[in-house]
Structure formats: C-alpha cells, structure tokens
Image (cartoon, grey):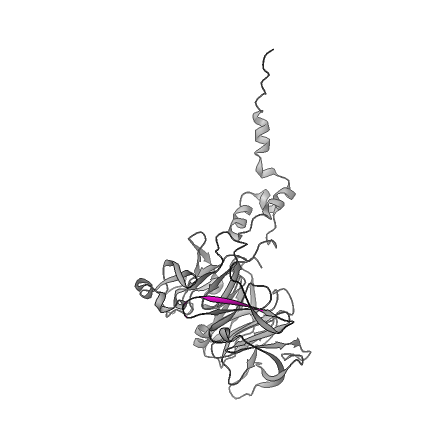
Amino acid sequence: MGLALSQKPRMDSLSEFRDWAHLPPEIVDLISEKVNYIVDYVRFRAVCSTWRSASRPKPRHLPPQLPWLMLPYDGYSWTTKDDTTRFFYDVWESKMREIHLPETEVMTCCASYLGWLLLVSYKGRQVSLLNPLTRCQIELPPFSTWFDPYMISFGMTKMTFSADLTDPNCLITALLEDNCVMSCQVGDRSWKRYYYQSKELADVTCYNGRLYFLYQGEMVIIEYNKSEHKGVLEPELIGAVVVLADLDFLDDDDEPNYIAAVELTVLLDPELAAVEKYFVEGKSGVSVVGFHPEGKFMLYQFQEQQMKLEKITIDSTAIFYGDNYPCLALSSDDWDSLDGGSLYMEHRRVPDALKLAAVKSGYHTKFARMVDGNVMYWYDINQESPYHQAAPAMWFQPSFF
C-alpha cells in the first residue's frame, strides 16, 4: 500500500491568510492595544486605511512614554528667520525627530509637562499650551506686565497639572526661580501668585486637590477649593497660616489682593534635607527624589496616613533629570530599554568631577546615563545649542492627550 502524501495548500488559501489589510476591525483594534511605544503606534496606524480606521486615534492604553530631549531654539531672534522646525532627540531610536510647529514662532518654550509645551511670547503678552503631536493649543492668561520677560524665559523651571486638562477643575501651576509660584485654570483671566516669606522654594507639584511646596527641610501642603468669587482660591483649614495673592492684571501702582490661606507642614528626613531635591512626576502619589553631590539619587514616597516621606527602593525606577522638566520617573518594568536605578541627566546637571574634558567644552547638547554615581555613557547630540538661547534643552514626554 502506497504512502499517502498530504496535498500542498492552495495558493489562494495562503493569500487569504496573508491579506492583513482585511483583518476584522475588532482584531486590528486588539492588536493595536499590544503596541506600547507611541512612535510604533503611529507606524501601526499608517500601514493602511483599514488599520487606521479600526484603531483609536488617541488610545488610552499607552503607558507613560519614554521621553525625548527637546533641543533649544531662539524664539526671540530678530536677526535670523525662524522656519519653526523644532528638534526632538529620540534616545531610544538614536534619531532626531523634526516637527514643524509654526505655533512656536516668536514664542519661547519655557517648560514641558505630560506632552504639553508652555509657550510664552515676548513680555508674556501671550501664553499658551501646545501638544506638538496633536497640534492642540490651549490659550492661558497672559503674564502680568511687571514681569521681566527675561525672567520668564530663563527663570521658569517647572510646570505641572493637578489633573487632566479636560477636567474643568485642573489647576495649572508654574514655578519660577525667584520663589514665585503661579497658578491658573483654563478660562481664567489672570494668574494667581503664591507668596512665601523667608523660605527658599525648591519645587512645587499638585496632587489630589492639594498643592505641595518643597523647601530645604520641610514639605508644605495646601488644600484648595475654587471660590465662587472670581479669581480667588480659598484653601480649607488644615494648619498654619500662609498668604496668597490674586494677580488680576496688576499695574505697577496697584497692590495685590491678599487672602488668608492655611498649610500643613511635614518635616523631611535629615538625609533628604541635606541634598538637592525635587518632586518626581510619573510616580503614583507624591514622591521626592534627592541627589547626592557624587551623582547618586534616592527616592521618597509620601505616606499620607503617617504624614511622612518614606524612603523606597530605586531598583525598578529610572529618573530623567533636566532643567525645565526637573524630574521624571519611569518604571523599568514597562520598558525593556530602561535599567532600574539609572539616572539620565542633561550635562549641565552632571557634577563637574564626573565630566570628561570633551563634555565640558563646546556647545553641543549632551546628556549622560549614570548608575550608582558612575557615568555609563555620554550622549553627544550633533546639534548646536548655544547657552544664550532662550531656553535650555528639556525632557519632553510625548502624549496624545
């Protein structure tokens, strides 16, 4: 009896299985949810019109994204024509990404937060938020005319949101180097300024209906509610008295409208109090990172019930440390390309003792990956970025929202 041989599959059967463009929409959507990197998701939707229509234009499943380094540009140049092309260095693909952003013409990018850029015009007459990927733009109140425009450009060190921008109660907070904290909500006519006397402010953040202020040896917490009276924030009674001011287009001769507010103080661990420190964006709850002079870092998590900052492990956390997005944390469990305990620092933040001679010289944008106080790798981006430009290089976390 002869051996029975199986027939070769028909070519039209193979073609049927290879017709990827006509997969059922629910299958395409299911596959798209397995894509985590925002660049790969854009590529996925660009495969064909069927995949594009079957997948969500703004997916919610993407984890916090690996940041890019946004290179400086001179938004106030009166001598050279600005073609409004902005450069973002993608560390993970070793690629410079160019995005044409005409919205940034004659505007300086002062800060970045969760995929949004804070743009300020000369003298602060125009202020807006811009998402470079979606091109969505949100107008904010102008800064008061008594602000020095150069202080706005060079001195703004932080921007943060208390919630998603679609939340009508979202508080947008900005920190300037002169201990000035300003906040507003979308639709407000003016910014509110928070005044503190005889205290050097390190950082500020928002979380769960509270403002958190970080000082050398303590963390101050303020609870706030939106008052029925326009332009005034009224915190609830939880502690000692501080002072706020309402800045409603003040002229030079006007006095601010002060209102009483209250605070709760949490003392810092002596080890954390002795070093440079910032709030960490990207961790759940409220976290603080401290930097030892030799380049090592430590993490603290705020325990609300015990009202204290507790030291936690850094094994599964990578920190990105820049100028206008001071500290961003990402979990190495979400990204194979990240090593826990790593610190990515813009080169001006790296201790001088750890810099190579070639790194100390020149005007190229550079940053380092450090582990346990040792520089593991220097990234030298071949793009001129003179220090006199209106803003330093900053970490930018791409997002669709």
Residue closer to the observer: 67 or 250 = 67
Does residue 388 belong to the magenta stretch? no
> Does residue 83 appear in this view?
no
The segment highlighted magenta reads 293-301
Q: Measuring 50% from the left and 71% from the top, which residue is drawn there?
A: 278
Tell me: residue 73, above or below residue 200.
Answer: above
Q: Quadrant of residue 301?
A: bottom right
Q: How far across and down, in percent of the image, does residue 321 sit?
A: 46, 65
Residue occupying the point 48% across, 60% down? 341
| Position in image of residue 355 (x %, y %) | 35, 65
Toward the viewer: 249 or 201? 201
For the N terminus, the image quarter is: top right
Q: Position of residue 242 (x, y in %)?
A: 59, 84
* Front-most of residues 361 and 373: 373
Q: Is residue 295 magenta?
A: yes
In the shown orientation, is residue 269 left or right of residue 170? Answer: left
Total count of labels: 0
* Residue at image point 51% right, 82% down: 199
Residue 191 in the image: x percent, y percent? 57, 77
**Left or right side of 96 for 12:** right
Question: Is residue 119 depicted above or below 88 in this figure?
Answer: below
Q: Quadrant of the C terminus?
A: bottom right
